[in-house]
Image (cartoon, coloured by chain):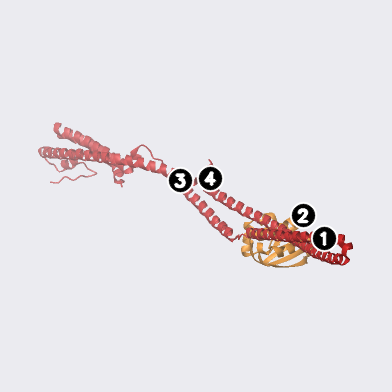
Chain colours: A orange, B red
Amino acid sequence: MQYSSEAASNGGIKYTLSGQLSAQHHPIFRVLLKELEAATFSHCTLNLAQLEFIDSGGLGMLLLANDMCKKRGSILVLQGATGNVLKILTLSQFQKIMTMID
Amino acid sequence: MMIRYNETQSGLSVLEQANIPAVLVQEIFVVQSQMFAGLQQHLRLFKEEIESYLTTITVPLAQQEKTVQEQQQILQKVIRNAEVLELGNAENLSLSEYGDFVESILNNAILLTIAYSKQAISMVYRLSDVVERLGTLGQLVVNISTVNRKTKMLALNATLEAAHAGQEGRAFHHVAAEVRDLSESISKLSHNMQTEIHHVTQGVLETHKMLVQCAAMDMQPMAEASEKLEHLITALLTQQERFAAVKQEIQALPAPQGDLPTVFPLVKKIQKFQSIVEKIQQQQGGVLEKLNNSTSIEEMQAFFATQENEMRAFFSMDASEITTVP
């Protein structure tokens, strides 16, 4: 997994994830989480449009990110998921837990 | 001479118009009487044949009707049973409810998997911290070893200095020896600590690796299972609709009745025809008797006129029903 970050509108922060988000990639995701923990933002968007694969560990890491945002009084938005990633997010009922947009 | 039946004129009128002698007319009546007797005999045989036929077909038809009723009941029972699935704990589910039930099981399994994965990743992060701390601890032990080596060197130097001092340095020599022994003990302790830290670190790293593997469950088979389940639910709903359609068809069938003629129209027609034959027999019996007992042509003429009207009315009434028999 690779990621990049940028400032978003209305005081938000946006991360773009690409490649595979699996349990094996926990170290790099933890770096992202630590960045998120240190940052100031109103809302966090994870752009998943370039994400090709996700497993249960990846879903667990997204939930950890969501927990972190909630603790900060913020929200996590998942954006642009497609294909199997979107199918698995929907199957896992993430749309009931966090905001998902195209 | 041939006597033809005429719808507008009776046979006697024709005979009268032809000026046929009374003796000849009486002979004709005798012939007719014989013909009527023959006809009556044929009608009687025909009636017996119909009665025999009715008896022959009535029993199998009644049995068949009973069988059809039983088959309908069995079919309805089969459909009722096929529509419901018993789970064994006194809980019954319809086909559509069964689909939802299986879907909820799969959804729960997915949610549990994700929850465990989340916990596993959290533990992985905690263990990463522990490994990091163990690394720091190991470095501290290395620092202790470094300090201890210096202490050991100091003790060695002190021993040498004490030897140079001779008798005056004897006490110092003793202290230096104690420090050297202490340093040896510290060296052994730090070595043991390093070994233990290494073992603990290895154990934590193995656990860390196992947790990562536990969290790395491929969700694709679950997605495929979910798709198959959707097909299954659709199939179950279709099946339920089929059963409902069959039930409606069965319910739309005419209710079986005990009166056999209403069940089988042909039997009704045959019975009607049988009553006609009986009536013809009665009529012909009366005609025969009258022919045998009549004393004058006028009397026969009056009788035939009456009979002819009655028969004509009778046949015109029943003929249409007879001809409608399939």
Q: Which of the two residues, B109 or B97, is positioned nearer the viewer here? A: B109
Marks 3 and 1, the one that precedes in the sequence = 3
Q: Is residue B260 above or below residue B213?
A: above
Instruction: Tell me if residue B323 can be seen.
Output: yes
The Cα–Cα distance between marks 4 and 2, rounded to whole angstroms, is 43 Å
Which residue matches tag 3? Answer: B79
The Cα–Cα distance between marks 1 and 2, rounded to whole angstroms, is 55 Å
Residue type, label 4: Leu
Tag 3 near tag 4, CB within 8 Å: no
Labels 4, 2: front one? 2
Which residue matches tag 4? Answer: B93
Q: Which mark is residue B69?
A: none
Labels 3, 2: front one? 2
Which residue matches tag 1? Answer: B179
Secondary structure of the residue carrying tag 2 is helix
Labels 1, 2: front one? 1
